[in-house]
Image (tube, rainbow, N blue to C red):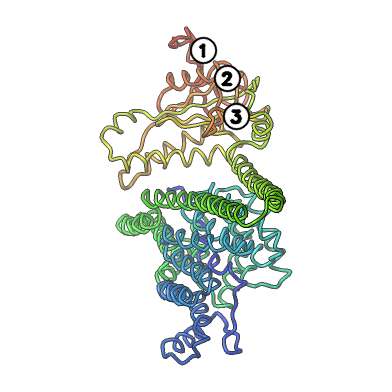
Protein backbone atom coordinates (compact mmCIF):
# COMPACT_ATOMS: atom_id res chain seq x y z
CA UNK A 1 0.00 0.00 0.00
CA UNK A 2 1.47 3.35 -1.02
CA UNK A 3 1.30 6.49 1.06
CA UNK A 4 -1.02 8.63 -1.04
CA UNK A 5 -2.23 12.17 -0.33
CA UNK A 6 -4.59 13.72 -2.86
CA UNK A 7 -3.96 17.39 -3.54
CA UNK A 8 -6.68 19.77 -4.72
CA UNK A 9 -4.75 21.15 -7.69
CA UNK A 10 -5.67 24.79 -8.10
CA UNK A 11 -5.66 24.92 -11.87
CA UNK A 12 -8.83 26.69 -13.04
CA UNK A 13 -9.50 27.96 -9.54
CA UNK A 14 -6.20 29.80 -9.62
CA UNK A 15 -6.81 31.06 -13.13
CA UNK A 16 -10.10 32.61 -12.02
CA UNK A 17 -8.57 34.44 -9.08
CA UNK A 18 -8.34 37.54 -11.28
CA UNK A 19 -12.05 38.13 -11.05
CA UNK A 20 -11.63 41.89 -11.15
CA UNK A 21 -11.02 41.83 -14.91
CA UNK A 22 -14.50 41.05 -16.30
CA UNK A 23 -14.93 42.96 -19.58
CA UNK A 24 -17.83 44.27 -21.65
CA UNK A 25 -17.73 43.96 -25.44
CA UNK A 26 -20.17 46.04 -27.58
CA UNK A 27 -22.46 46.50 -24.58
CA UNK A 28 -22.94 42.77 -24.02
CA UNK A 29 -21.62 40.98 -20.92
CA UNK A 30 -20.11 37.65 -21.95
CA UNK A 31 -20.58 34.69 -19.59
CA UNK A 32 -17.93 32.06 -19.12
CA UNK A 33 -19.58 28.96 -20.58
CA UNK A 34 -18.06 27.14 -23.52
CA UNK A 35 -20.89 27.87 -25.98
CA UNK A 36 -20.45 31.63 -25.67
CA UNK A 37 -16.65 31.31 -25.81
CA UNK A 38 -17.06 29.36 -29.08
CA UNK A 39 -19.23 32.19 -30.42
CA UNK A 40 -16.68 34.82 -29.46
CA UNK A 41 -13.94 32.73 -31.04
CA UNK A 42 -15.86 32.69 -34.34
CA UNK A 43 -16.22 36.49 -34.14
CA UNK A 44 -12.45 36.80 -33.74
CA UNK A 45 -11.49 34.23 -36.39
CA UNK A 46 -13.94 35.72 -38.94
CA UNK A 47 -12.67 39.24 -38.16
CA UNK A 48 -16.24 40.49 -37.60
CA UNK A 49 -15.43 43.01 -34.89
CA UNK A 50 -14.50 46.66 -34.65
CA UNK A 51 -10.78 47.45 -34.46
CA UNK A 52 -11.17 49.17 -31.10
CA UNK A 53 -12.77 45.98 -29.67
CA UNK A 54 -9.87 43.67 -30.63
CA UNK A 55 -7.99 43.84 -27.30
CA UNK A 56 -11.20 43.35 -25.26
CA UNK A 57 -12.10 40.29 -27.35
CA UNK A 58 -8.62 38.77 -27.02
CA UNK A 59 -8.71 39.48 -23.27
CA UNK A 60 -11.89 37.41 -22.84
CA UNK A 61 -10.67 34.54 -25.04
CA UNK A 62 -7.28 34.38 -23.27
CA UNK A 63 -8.91 34.43 -19.83
CA UNK A 64 -11.92 32.15 -20.30
CA UNK A 65 -11.08 29.65 -23.09
CA UNK A 66 -11.42 26.10 -21.68
CA UNK A 67 -8.63 24.74 -23.92
CA UNK A 68 -5.27 25.76 -22.33
CA UNK A 69 -3.48 25.49 -25.69
CA UNK A 70 -5.83 28.02 -27.29
CA UNK A 71 -5.85 30.19 -24.17
CA UNK A 72 -2.03 30.31 -24.46
CA UNK A 73 -2.20 31.34 -28.13
CA UNK A 74 -4.75 34.09 -27.43
CA UNK A 75 -2.78 35.41 -24.44
CA UNK A 76 0.45 35.64 -26.49
CA UNK A 77 -1.47 37.43 -29.27
CA UNK A 78 -2.95 39.82 -26.67
CA UNK A 79 0.55 40.63 -25.36
CA UNK A 80 1.89 41.33 -28.86
CA UNK A 81 -1.08 43.50 -29.89
CA UNK A 82 -1.13 45.47 -26.63
CA UNK A 83 2.64 46.08 -26.75
CA UNK A 84 2.23 47.47 -30.28
CA UNK A 85 -0.51 49.81 -29.00
CA UNK A 86 1.44 50.65 -25.82
CA UNK A 87 -1.39 49.41 -23.59
CA UNK A 88 0.24 48.50 -20.27
CA UNK A 89 -3.10 47.31 -18.84
CA UNK A 90 -3.53 44.62 -21.49
CA UNK A 91 0.16 43.66 -21.42
CA UNK A 92 -0.26 42.97 -17.70
CA UNK A 93 -3.46 40.93 -18.09
CA UNK A 94 -2.00 39.10 -21.10
CA UNK A 95 1.01 38.03 -19.03
CA UNK A 96 -1.30 36.79 -16.26
CA UNK A 97 -3.49 34.82 -18.68
CA UNK A 98 -0.39 33.34 -20.33
CA UNK A 99 0.87 32.22 -16.91
CA UNK A 100 -2.55 30.77 -16.11
CA UNK A 101 -2.64 28.77 -19.37
CA UNK A 102 0.89 27.46 -18.81
CA UNK A 103 -0.03 26.50 -15.24
CA UNK A 104 -3.05 24.53 -16.49
CA UNK A 105 -0.71 22.74 -18.92
CA UNK A 106 1.76 21.95 -16.14
CA UNK A 107 4.56 24.14 -17.61
CA UNK A 108 5.33 25.78 -14.28
CA UNK A 109 8.77 27.20 -15.10
CA UNK A 110 7.46 29.18 -18.10
CA UNK A 111 4.40 30.22 -16.08
CA UNK A 112 6.63 31.65 -13.38
CA UNK A 113 8.58 33.67 -15.95
CA UNK A 114 5.34 35.22 -17.23
CA UNK A 115 4.11 36.05 -13.71
CA UNK A 116 7.39 37.75 -12.77
CA UNK A 117 7.13 39.95 -15.89
CA UNK A 118 3.63 40.95 -14.73
CA UNK A 119 5.10 41.69 -11.29
CA UNK A 120 7.58 44.13 -12.85
CA UNK A 121 4.68 46.05 -14.44
CA UNK A 122 2.80 46.22 -11.11
CA UNK A 123 5.93 47.50 -9.34
CA UNK A 124 6.63 50.10 -12.04
CA UNK A 125 3.01 51.35 -11.82
CA UNK A 126 3.09 51.21 -7.99
CA UNK A 127 -0.23 49.35 -8.23
CA UNK A 128 -0.68 47.38 -4.98
CA UNK A 129 -3.79 45.55 -6.15
CA UNK A 130 -2.04 44.15 -9.22
CA UNK A 131 0.98 43.25 -7.10
CA UNK A 132 -1.24 41.42 -4.61
CA UNK A 133 -2.97 39.42 -7.35
CA UNK A 134 0.20 38.36 -9.12
CA UNK A 135 1.81 37.44 -5.76
CA UNK A 136 -1.00 34.93 -5.23
CA UNK A 137 -0.54 33.42 -8.71
CA UNK A 138 3.21 33.02 -8.06
CA UNK A 139 2.37 31.32 -4.75
CA UNK A 140 0.07 28.95 -6.66
CA UNK A 141 2.90 27.90 -8.98
CA UNK A 142 5.23 27.18 -6.07
CA UNK A 143 2.39 25.24 -4.41
CA UNK A 144 1.88 23.09 -7.51
CA UNK A 145 5.64 22.40 -7.63
CA UNK A 146 5.65 21.34 -3.96
CA UNK A 147 7.77 24.29 -2.75
CA UNK A 148 5.87 24.90 0.51
CA UNK A 149 8.11 27.64 1.93
CA UNK A 150 8.04 29.85 -1.18
CA UNK A 151 4.29 29.25 -1.61
CA UNK A 152 3.46 30.36 1.94
CA UNK A 153 5.78 33.39 1.64
CA UNK A 154 3.99 34.67 -1.48
CA UNK A 155 0.50 33.80 -0.12
CA UNK A 156 1.16 35.86 3.00
CA UNK A 157 2.47 38.75 0.92
CA UNK A 158 -0.54 38.70 -1.42
CA UNK A 159 -3.13 38.30 1.36
CA UNK A 160 -1.63 41.23 3.29
CA UNK A 161 -1.94 43.49 0.22
CA UNK A 162 -5.49 42.34 -0.64
CA UNK A 163 -6.69 42.95 2.93
CA UNK A 164 -5.37 46.49 2.66
CA UNK A 165 -7.15 46.92 -0.69
CA UNK A 166 -10.52 45.64 0.68
CA UNK A 167 -10.80 43.27 -2.31
CA UNK A 168 -13.30 40.69 -1.01
CA UNK A 169 -13.44 38.24 -3.94
CA UNK A 170 -9.71 38.05 -4.54
CA UNK A 171 -8.96 37.99 -0.80
CA UNK A 172 -11.33 35.04 -0.35
CA UNK A 173 -9.72 33.24 -3.31
CA UNK A 174 -6.24 33.87 -1.88
CA UNK A 175 -7.29 32.56 1.55
CA UNK A 176 -8.78 29.48 -0.13
CA UNK A 177 -5.56 28.76 -2.03
CA UNK A 178 -3.38 29.31 1.05
CA UNK A 179 -5.64 27.01 3.06
CA UNK A 180 -5.28 24.39 0.34
CA UNK A 181 -1.47 24.64 0.62
CA UNK A 182 -1.71 24.04 4.39
CA UNK A 183 -4.05 21.10 3.64
CA UNK A 184 -1.43 19.60 1.31
CA UNK A 185 1.06 19.77 4.21
CA UNK A 186 -1.45 18.11 6.60
CA UNK A 187 -1.57 21.29 8.71
CA UNK A 188 -5.33 20.85 9.15
CA UNK A 189 -5.74 23.52 11.83
CA UNK A 190 -4.23 26.25 9.66
CA UNK A 191 -6.20 24.97 6.65
CA UNK A 192 -9.54 25.16 8.52
CA UNK A 193 -8.81 28.72 9.72
CA UNK A 194 -8.26 29.89 6.14
CA UNK A 195 -11.27 27.94 4.77
CA UNK A 196 -13.62 29.33 7.41
CA UNK A 197 -12.67 32.93 6.57
CA UNK A 198 -12.84 32.39 2.79
CA UNK A 199 -16.16 30.52 3.08
CA UNK A 200 -17.73 33.36 5.05
CA UNK A 201 -16.63 35.92 2.43
CA UNK A 202 -17.92 33.79 -0.49
CA UNK A 203 -21.25 33.34 1.29
CA UNK A 204 -21.63 37.06 1.98
CA UNK A 205 -21.01 38.00 -1.67
CA UNK A 206 -23.05 35.02 -2.98
CA UNK A 207 -20.17 33.71 -5.14
CA UNK A 208 -21.08 30.14 -6.13
CA UNK A 209 -17.74 29.12 -7.62
CA UNK A 210 -15.87 30.12 -4.46
CA UNK A 211 -18.47 28.37 -2.31
CA UNK A 212 -17.97 25.20 -4.38
CA UNK A 213 -14.20 25.17 -3.86
CA UNK A 214 -14.64 25.89 -0.19
CA UNK A 215 -17.06 22.96 0.21
CA UNK A 216 -14.64 20.66 -1.62
CA UNK A 217 -11.66 21.69 0.46
CA UNK A 218 -13.49 21.32 3.76
CA UNK A 219 -14.59 17.90 2.49
CA UNK A 220 -10.95 16.92 2.03
CA UNK A 221 -10.16 18.02 5.58
CA UNK A 222 -12.98 15.76 6.79
CA UNK A 223 -11.55 12.89 4.71
CA UNK A 224 -8.12 13.29 6.29
CA UNK A 225 -9.80 13.31 9.72
CA UNK A 226 -11.52 10.01 8.88
CA UNK A 227 -15.00 11.61 8.68
CA UNK A 228 -15.81 9.98 5.33
CA UNK A 229 -19.56 10.57 5.32
CA UNK A 230 -19.16 14.30 5.92
CA UNK A 231 -16.37 14.40 3.34
CA UNK A 232 -18.61 12.82 0.66
CA UNK A 233 -21.48 15.22 1.41
CA UNK A 234 -19.22 18.27 1.01
CA UNK A 235 -17.40 17.03 -2.10
CA UNK A 236 -20.63 15.98 -3.86
CA UNK A 237 -22.13 19.39 -3.08
CA UNK A 238 -19.04 21.07 -4.56
CA UNK A 239 -19.24 18.97 -7.75
CA UNK A 240 -22.96 19.72 -8.13
CA UNK A 241 -22.33 23.49 -8.00
CA UNK A 242 -19.40 23.27 -10.43
CA UNK A 243 -21.51 21.29 -12.91
CA UNK A 244 -24.32 23.85 -12.64
CA UNK A 245 -21.97 26.73 -13.47
CA UNK A 246 -20.16 24.64 -16.11
CA UNK A 247 -16.70 24.71 -14.56
CA UNK A 248 -15.29 21.21 -15.09
CA UNK A 249 -11.51 21.33 -14.59
CA UNK A 250 -11.35 21.01 -10.76
CA UNK A 251 -13.96 18.23 -10.75
CA UNK A 252 -11.17 15.82 -11.75
CA UNK A 253 -9.46 16.31 -8.36
CA UNK A 254 -12.70 15.87 -6.44
CA UNK A 255 -13.57 12.68 -8.35
CA UNK A 256 -10.16 11.22 -7.50
CA UNK A 257 -10.64 12.11 -3.87
CA UNK A 258 -14.10 10.46 -3.83
CA UNK A 259 -12.54 7.35 -5.38
CA UNK A 260 -10.08 7.14 -2.50
CA UNK A 261 -12.88 7.44 0.07
CA UNK A 262 -14.82 4.57 -1.55
CA UNK A 263 -11.62 2.52 -1.81
CA UNK A 264 -10.99 2.87 1.91
CA UNK A 265 -14.56 1.70 2.50
CA UNK A 266 -13.97 -1.39 0.29
CA UNK A 267 -16.39 -0.31 -2.47
CA UNK A 268 -13.98 -1.19 -5.27
CA UNK A 269 -16.33 -0.80 -8.23
CA UNK A 270 -17.53 2.67 -7.23
CA UNK A 271 -13.97 3.72 -6.50
CA UNK A 272 -12.84 2.59 -9.98
CA UNK A 273 -15.78 4.38 -11.63
CA UNK A 274 -14.90 7.73 -10.03
CA UNK A 275 -11.17 7.42 -10.76
CA UNK A 276 -11.85 6.56 -14.44
CA UNK A 277 -14.18 9.58 -14.71
CA UNK A 278 -11.42 11.73 -13.22
CA UNK A 279 -8.86 10.43 -15.73
CA UNK A 280 -11.23 10.99 -18.66
CA UNK A 281 -11.88 14.60 -17.61
CA UNK A 282 -8.18 15.32 -17.00
CA UNK A 283 -7.22 13.91 -20.41
CA UNK A 284 -9.93 15.98 -22.11
CA UNK A 285 -8.44 19.21 -20.76
CA UNK A 286 -4.78 18.12 -20.85
CA UNK A 287 -4.24 18.47 -17.08
CA UNK A 288 -0.93 16.70 -16.39
CA UNK A 289 -1.14 16.79 -12.58
CA UNK A 290 -4.67 15.36 -12.56
CA UNK A 291 -3.76 12.73 -15.17
CA UNK A 292 -0.88 11.62 -12.95
CA UNK A 293 -3.06 11.46 -9.81
CA UNK A 294 -5.88 9.57 -11.55
CA UNK A 295 -3.44 7.01 -13.00
CA UNK A 296 -1.95 6.46 -9.55
CA UNK A 297 -5.39 5.94 -8.02
CA UNK A 298 -6.41 3.39 -10.70
CA UNK A 299 -3.04 1.67 -10.21
CA UNK A 300 -3.74 1.33 -6.48
CA UNK A 301 -7.19 -0.09 -7.15
CA UNK A 302 -5.85 -2.79 -9.50
CA UNK A 303 -3.08 -3.60 -7.04
CA UNK A 304 -5.74 -4.09 -4.38
CA UNK A 305 -7.53 -6.54 -6.71
CA UNK A 306 -4.29 -8.40 -7.45
CA UNK A 307 -4.30 -7.43 -11.15
CA UNK A 308 -0.58 -6.67 -11.41
CA UNK A 309 -0.56 -6.14 -15.19
CA UNK A 310 -3.08 -3.28 -15.01
CA UNK A 311 -1.48 -2.02 -11.79
CA UNK A 312 1.96 -1.64 -13.46
CA UNK A 313 0.44 -0.16 -16.64
CA UNK A 314 -1.31 2.68 -14.82
CA UNK A 315 1.59 3.19 -12.41
CA UNK A 316 3.96 3.74 -15.35
CA UNK A 317 1.52 6.33 -16.73
CA UNK A 318 1.49 8.03 -13.33
CA UNK A 319 5.30 8.23 -13.19
CA UNK A 320 5.53 9.52 -16.78
CA UNK A 321 3.16 12.43 -16.12
CA UNK A 322 4.56 13.07 -12.65
CA UNK A 323 8.09 13.40 -14.04
CA UNK A 324 6.84 15.79 -16.74
CA UNK A 325 5.38 18.10 -14.07
CA UNK A 326 7.99 17.90 -11.30
CA UNK A 327 11.64 17.10 -11.95
CA UNK A 328 14.99 18.26 -10.66
CA UNK A 329 15.82 20.45 -13.67
CA UNK A 330 12.46 22.25 -13.40
CA UNK A 331 13.03 22.93 -9.72
CA UNK A 332 16.49 24.28 -10.48
CA UNK A 333 15.13 26.42 -13.32
CA UNK A 334 12.48 27.91 -11.02
CA UNK A 335 15.07 28.71 -8.36
CA UNK A 336 17.19 30.46 -11.01
CA UNK A 337 14.18 32.43 -12.28
CA UNK A 338 13.31 33.63 -8.81
CA UNK A 339 16.93 34.62 -8.08
CA UNK A 340 17.22 36.45 -11.42
CA UNK A 341 13.98 38.30 -10.71
CA UNK A 342 15.08 39.48 -7.29
CA UNK A 343 18.52 40.49 -8.62
CA UNK A 344 16.87 42.43 -11.47
CA UNK A 345 14.77 44.36 -8.95
CA UNK A 346 17.89 45.33 -7.02
CA UNK A 347 19.66 46.34 -10.25
CA UNK A 348 16.73 48.60 -11.18
CA UNK A 349 17.09 50.37 -7.85
CA UNK A 350 20.86 50.77 -8.32
CA UNK A 351 20.40 52.13 -11.87
CA UNK A 352 17.79 54.57 -10.62
CA UNK A 353 20.12 55.88 -7.92
CA UNK A 354 22.97 56.25 -10.42
CA UNK A 355 20.71 58.13 -12.82
CA UNK A 356 19.61 60.44 -10.02
CA UNK A 357 23.23 61.17 -9.13
CA UNK A 358 24.10 62.02 -12.75
CA UNK A 359 21.08 64.33 -12.97
CA UNK A 360 22.09 66.05 -9.77
CA UNK A 361 25.63 66.71 -11.03
CA UNK A 362 24.34 68.23 -14.28
CA UNK A 363 21.90 70.44 -12.39
CA UNK A 364 24.55 71.64 -9.94
CA UNK A 365 26.89 72.54 -12.82
CA UNK A 366 24.13 74.50 -14.59
CA UNK A 367 23.35 76.43 -11.41
CA UNK A 368 27.02 77.38 -10.91
CA UNK A 369 27.26 78.72 -14.49
CA UNK A 370 23.90 80.50 -14.68
CA UNK A 371 23.25 82.05 -11.27
CA UNK A 372 24.87 84.61 -9.01
CA UNK A 373 26.71 83.44 -5.93
CA UNK A 374 23.89 84.37 -3.52
CA UNK A 375 21.19 82.62 -5.56
CA UNK A 376 23.50 79.63 -6.03
CA UNK A 377 24.01 79.42 -2.27
CA UNK A 378 20.25 79.50 -1.62
CA UNK A 379 19.56 76.84 -4.22
CA UNK A 380 22.45 74.78 -2.89
CA UNK A 381 20.90 74.82 0.60
CA UNK A 382 17.54 73.79 -0.80
CA UNK A 383 19.04 71.00 -2.89
CA UNK A 384 20.94 69.70 0.13
CA UNK A 385 17.72 69.52 2.10
CA UNK A 386 15.94 67.78 -0.77
CA UNK A 387 18.79 65.30 -1.23
CA UNK A 388 18.88 64.41 2.47
CA UNK A 389 15.12 63.93 2.54
CA UNK A 390 15.17 61.68 -0.52
CA UNK A 391 18.18 59.74 0.76
CA UNK A 392 16.45 59.19 4.10
CA UNK A 393 13.44 57.77 2.28
CA UNK A 394 15.62 55.40 0.25
CA UNK A 395 17.41 54.29 3.42
CA UNK A 396 14.07 53.77 5.18
CA UNK A 397 12.75 51.67 2.29
CA UNK A 398 15.90 49.53 2.29
CA UNK A 399 15.67 49.17 6.07
CA UNK A 400 12.07 47.92 5.84
CA UNK A 401 13.03 45.48 3.09
CA UNK A 402 15.96 44.17 5.14
CA UNK A 403 13.77 43.74 8.22
CA UNK A 404 11.21 41.71 6.26
CA UNK A 405 13.96 39.50 4.84
CA UNK A 406 15.46 38.99 8.29
CA UNK A 407 12.11 37.83 9.69
CA UNK A 408 11.96 35.19 6.94
CA UNK A 409 15.36 33.80 8.00
CA UNK A 410 15.35 33.99 11.82
CA UNK A 411 12.78 33.75 14.65
CA UNK A 412 11.26 37.14 15.45
CA UNK A 413 12.88 37.36 18.89
CA UNK A 414 16.30 36.51 17.44
CA UNK A 415 15.85 38.94 14.53
CA UNK A 416 14.90 41.76 16.94
CA UNK A 417 18.01 41.11 19.02
CA UNK A 418 20.16 41.13 15.87
CA UNK A 419 18.71 44.51 14.80
CA UNK A 420 19.17 46.12 18.20
CA UNK A 421 22.69 44.91 19.05
CA UNK A 422 24.18 43.89 15.69
CA UNK A 423 24.66 40.34 16.93
CA UNK A 424 22.76 37.59 18.70
CA UNK A 425 23.86 36.45 22.12
CA UNK A 426 24.10 32.69 22.43
CA UNK A 427 21.55 31.21 24.85
CA UNK A 428 21.87 28.14 27.02
CA UNK A 429 18.79 25.94 27.19
CA UNK A 430 18.86 23.42 30.03
CA UNK A 431 16.90 20.58 28.43
CA UNK A 432 16.77 19.85 24.69
CA UNK A 433 16.40 16.57 22.84
CA UNK A 434 18.66 16.16 19.78
CA UNK A 435 18.21 13.55 17.03
CA UNK A 436 20.67 12.42 14.35
CA UNK A 437 19.98 10.12 11.38
CA UNK A 438 22.38 8.57 8.91
CA UNK A 439 21.83 6.27 5.91
CA UNK A 440 23.62 2.90 5.85
CA UNK A 441 26.22 2.53 3.08
CA UNK A 442 25.31 5.91 1.58
CA UNK A 443 28.90 6.72 0.62
CA UNK A 444 29.20 3.48 -1.33
CA UNK A 445 25.99 4.25 -3.25
CA UNK A 446 27.01 7.87 -3.82
CA UNK A 447 30.17 6.81 -5.64
CA UNK A 448 28.18 4.80 -8.19
CA UNK A 449 24.95 6.78 -8.63
CA UNK A 450 24.38 9.59 -11.19
CA UNK A 451 24.17 13.00 -9.45
CA UNK A 452 20.52 13.52 -10.44
CA UNK A 453 19.45 10.19 -8.95
CA UNK A 454 21.44 10.88 -5.77
CA UNK A 455 19.74 14.29 -5.33
CA UNK A 456 16.30 12.77 -5.96
CA UNK A 457 16.91 10.08 -3.35
CA UNK A 458 18.10 12.48 -0.63
CA UNK A 459 15.27 14.93 -1.40
CA UNK A 460 12.74 12.07 -1.23
CA UNK A 461 13.76 11.27 2.37
CA UNK A 462 14.55 14.74 3.74
CA UNK A 463 11.31 16.27 2.43
CA UNK A 464 9.35 13.70 4.45
CA UNK A 465 11.58 14.23 7.51
CA UNK A 466 10.84 18.00 7.29
CA UNK A 467 7.10 17.31 7.24
CA UNK A 468 7.42 15.07 10.32
CA UNK A 469 9.34 17.81 12.17
CA UNK A 470 6.60 20.32 11.37
CA UNK A 471 3.93 17.86 12.53
CA UNK A 472 5.48 17.49 15.99
CA UNK A 473 6.59 21.12 16.38
CA UNK A 474 10.30 20.24 16.28
CA UNK A 475 13.14 22.25 14.74
CA UNK A 476 15.24 21.08 11.81
CA UNK A 477 18.76 22.36 12.49
CA UNK A 478 20.70 21.32 9.37
CA UNK A 479 21.72 18.52 7.01
CA UNK A 480 25.28 17.52 6.25
CA UNK A 481 25.54 15.12 3.32
CA UNK A 482 23.20 12.26 4.20
CA UNK A 483 23.05 13.18 7.92
CA UNK A 484 19.90 14.91 9.24
CA UNK A 485 19.94 16.81 12.55
CA UNK A 486 16.94 18.18 14.47
CA UNK A 487 16.06 19.25 18.01
CA UNK A 488 13.06 19.62 20.30
CA UNK A 489 12.55 22.06 23.15
CA UNK A 490 13.88 25.16 21.38
CA UNK A 491 13.90 28.05 20.64
CA UNK A 492 11.26 28.08 23.41
CA UNK A 493 11.57 25.43 26.19
CA UNK A 494 8.88 22.71 26.39
CA UNK A 495 8.33 19.79 28.76
CA UNK A 496 7.49 16.97 26.33
CA UNK A 497 10.27 17.41 23.77
CA UNK A 498 11.79 13.96 24.46
CA UNK A 499 8.44 12.20 23.89
CA UNK A 500 7.72 14.17 20.69
CA UNK A 501 11.19 13.49 19.33
CA UNK A 502 10.84 9.76 20.00
CA UNK A 503 7.44 9.71 18.26
CA UNK A 504 8.97 11.56 15.31
CA UNK A 505 11.82 9.02 15.23
CA UNK A 506 9.29 6.17 14.98
CA UNK A 507 7.62 7.89 12.00
CA UNK A 508 10.97 8.47 10.28
CA UNK A 509 11.93 4.83 10.80
CA UNK A 510 8.56 3.55 9.54
CA UNK A 511 8.71 5.81 6.47
CA UNK A 512 12.21 4.58 5.56
CA UNK A 513 11.18 0.95 5.95
CA UNK A 514 8.01 1.40 3.88
CA UNK A 515 9.89 3.28 1.14
CA UNK A 516 12.33 0.39 0.79
CA UNK A 517 9.60 -2.27 0.88
CA UNK A 518 7.30 -0.53 -1.63
CA UNK A 519 9.71 0.27 -4.44
CA UNK A 520 8.22 -1.13 -7.70
CA UNK A 521 10.56 0.73 -10.06
CA UNK A 522 13.73 -0.08 -8.06
CA UNK A 523 14.71 3.44 -7.07
CA UNK A 524 17.67 3.89 -4.72
CA UNK A 525 16.49 3.34 -1.16
CA UNK A 526 18.44 2.95 2.12
CA UNK A 527 18.32 1.66 5.66
CA UNK A 528 18.69 4.24 8.42
CA UNK A 529 20.29 4.56 11.87
CA UNK A 530 18.77 6.91 14.44
CA UNK A 531 20.31 8.24 17.65
CA UNK A 532 18.78 10.50 20.34
CA UNK A 533 20.18 12.28 23.41
CA UNK A 534 18.76 14.82 25.86
CA UNK A 535 20.58 17.51 27.79
CA UNK A 536 21.65 21.16 27.88
CA UNK A 537 22.78 22.98 24.73
CA UNK A 538 23.86 26.42 23.61
CA UNK A 539 21.83 27.90 20.70
CA UNK A 540 22.63 30.92 18.60
CA UNK A 541 23.13 32.45 15.18
CA UNK A 542 26.35 32.04 13.18
CA UNK A 543 27.56 33.87 10.10
CA UNK A 544 27.75 37.50 9.01
CA UNK A 545 26.35 37.30 5.47
CA UNK A 546 24.23 34.15 5.48
CA UNK A 547 22.77 33.71 8.95
CA UNK A 548 22.14 30.21 10.27
CA UNK A 549 20.52 29.07 13.52
CA UNK A 550 22.65 26.30 15.12
CA UNK A 551 23.24 24.47 18.42
CA UNK A 552 26.38 23.29 20.22
CA UNK A 553 27.39 21.35 23.30
CA UNK A 554 28.19 17.94 24.70
CA UNK A 555 24.53 16.95 24.25
CA UNK A 556 24.89 17.33 20.49
CA UNK A 557 28.08 15.26 20.39
CA UNK A 558 26.55 12.44 22.44
CA UNK A 559 23.45 12.40 20.19
CA UNK A 560 25.79 11.90 17.22
CA UNK A 561 27.51 9.02 19.07
CA UNK A 562 24.09 7.46 19.75
CA UNK A 563 23.44 7.42 16.00
CA UNK A 564 26.90 6.00 15.22
CA UNK A 565 26.37 3.16 17.73
CA UNK A 566 22.81 2.43 16.58
CA UNK A 567 21.80 -0.31 14.17
CA UNK A 568 19.92 -0.03 10.84
CA UNK A 569 16.19 0.25 11.43
CA UNK A 570 16.54 0.93 15.18
CA UNK A 571 16.39 3.94 17.50
CA UNK A 572 19.26 4.18 20.01
CA UNK A 573 18.86 6.57 22.98
CA UNK A 574 21.11 7.69 25.81
CA UNK A 575 20.45 7.21 29.51
CA UNK A 576 19.28 10.85 29.80
CA UNK A 577 16.58 10.35 27.16
CA UNK A 578 15.66 6.93 28.58
CA UNK A 579 14.78 8.48 31.96
CA UNK A 580 12.29 10.85 30.24
CA UNK A 581 10.53 8.28 28.00
CA UNK A 582 10.74 4.98 29.87
CA UNK A 583 7.16 5.22 31.18
CA UNK A 584 5.75 5.78 27.68
CA UNK A 585 7.78 3.44 25.47
CA UNK A 586 9.37 0.01 25.78
CA UNK A 587 13.14 0.29 26.16
CA UNK A 588 15.73 -2.47 25.79
CA UNK A 589 18.92 -1.96 27.81
CA UNK A 590 21.95 -2.66 25.60
CA UNK A 591 24.50 -2.43 28.39
CA UNK A 592 27.42 -0.07 28.61
CA UNK A 593 29.01 0.40 25.19
CA UNK A 594 32.43 1.84 24.53
CA UNK A 595 32.12 5.23 22.74
CA UNK A 596 34.91 7.06 20.96
CA UNK A 597 36.38 9.79 23.19
CA UNK A 598 33.62 9.15 25.78
CA UNK A 599 34.39 5.90 27.50
CA UNK A 600 31.51 3.54 28.36
CA UNK A 601 27.94 4.83 28.05
CA UNK A 602 24.58 3.21 28.78
CA UNK A 603 22.40 2.83 25.71
CA UNK A 604 18.86 1.67 25.02
CA UNK A 605 16.86 0.58 21.98
CA UNK A 606 13.34 2.09 22.01
CA UNK A 607 10.19 0.32 20.79
CA UNK A 608 6.51 1.26 20.77
CA UNK A 609 4.45 -0.23 23.56
CA UNK A 610 2.23 -3.14 22.55
CA UNK A 611 -1.36 -1.90 22.22
Distance from the alpha carbon under mark 1 to that under mark 2: 10 Å
Q: Position of residue 146 (x, y in %)?
A: 48, 51
Q: Position of residue 131 (x, y in %)?
A: 59, 61
Q: Quadrant of the C terminus?
A: top right
Comparing labels 2 and 3, the label whose residue is closer to the camera: 3
Q: Is residue 416 left or right of residue 507?
A: right
Q: Is residue 371 left or right of residue 7?
A: right
- Kindly identify which numbered label has been placed on residue 488: 3
Q: Is residue 63 above or below residue 24?
A: above
- Kindly identify which numbered label has been placed on residue 578: 2
Distance from the alpha carbon under mark 2 to that under mark 3: 15 Å
Nearest the viewer among 334 and 583 is 334
Q: Position of residue 241 (x, y in %)?
A: 60, 73
Residue at the spot 36% in from the left edge and 59% down from the top edge: 321
Which SS class for mark 1?
Answer: strand
Distance from the alpha carbon under mark 1 to that under mark 3: 22 Å
Comparing labels 1 and 3, the label whose residue is closer to the camera: 3
- Kindly identify which numbered label has been placed on residue 602: 1
Q: Earlier in the sequence, mark 1 or mark 2?
A: 2
Nearest the viewer among 172 and 269 is 172
Q: Is residue 373 above or below residue 544?
A: below
Residue at the spot 47% in from the left edge and 66% down from the top edge: 274
Q: Is residue 200 left or right of residue 365?
A: right
Q: Tags 1 and 2 in contact by the CB under 8 Å rule? A: yes
Q: Earlier in the sequence, mark 1 or mark 3?
A: 3
Amino acid sequence: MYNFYFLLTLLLKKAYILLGFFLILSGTVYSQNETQIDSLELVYLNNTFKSEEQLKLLDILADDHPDPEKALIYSETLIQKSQALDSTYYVYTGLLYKGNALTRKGNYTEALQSYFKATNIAIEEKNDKKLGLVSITIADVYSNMGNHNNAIQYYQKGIKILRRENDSVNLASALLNAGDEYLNQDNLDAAIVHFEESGLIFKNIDFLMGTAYNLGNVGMVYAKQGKDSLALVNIKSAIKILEEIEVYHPISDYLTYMSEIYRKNNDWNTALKYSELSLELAQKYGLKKQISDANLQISKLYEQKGNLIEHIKYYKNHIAYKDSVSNISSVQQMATIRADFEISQKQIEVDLLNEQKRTQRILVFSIIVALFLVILLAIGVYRRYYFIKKTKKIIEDEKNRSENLLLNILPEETAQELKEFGKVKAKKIESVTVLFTDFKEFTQYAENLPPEELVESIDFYFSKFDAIMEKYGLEKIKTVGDAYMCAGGLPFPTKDHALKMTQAAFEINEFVKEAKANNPINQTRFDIRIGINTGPIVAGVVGTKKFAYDIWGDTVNIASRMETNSEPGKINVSENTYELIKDTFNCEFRGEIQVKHRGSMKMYFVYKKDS
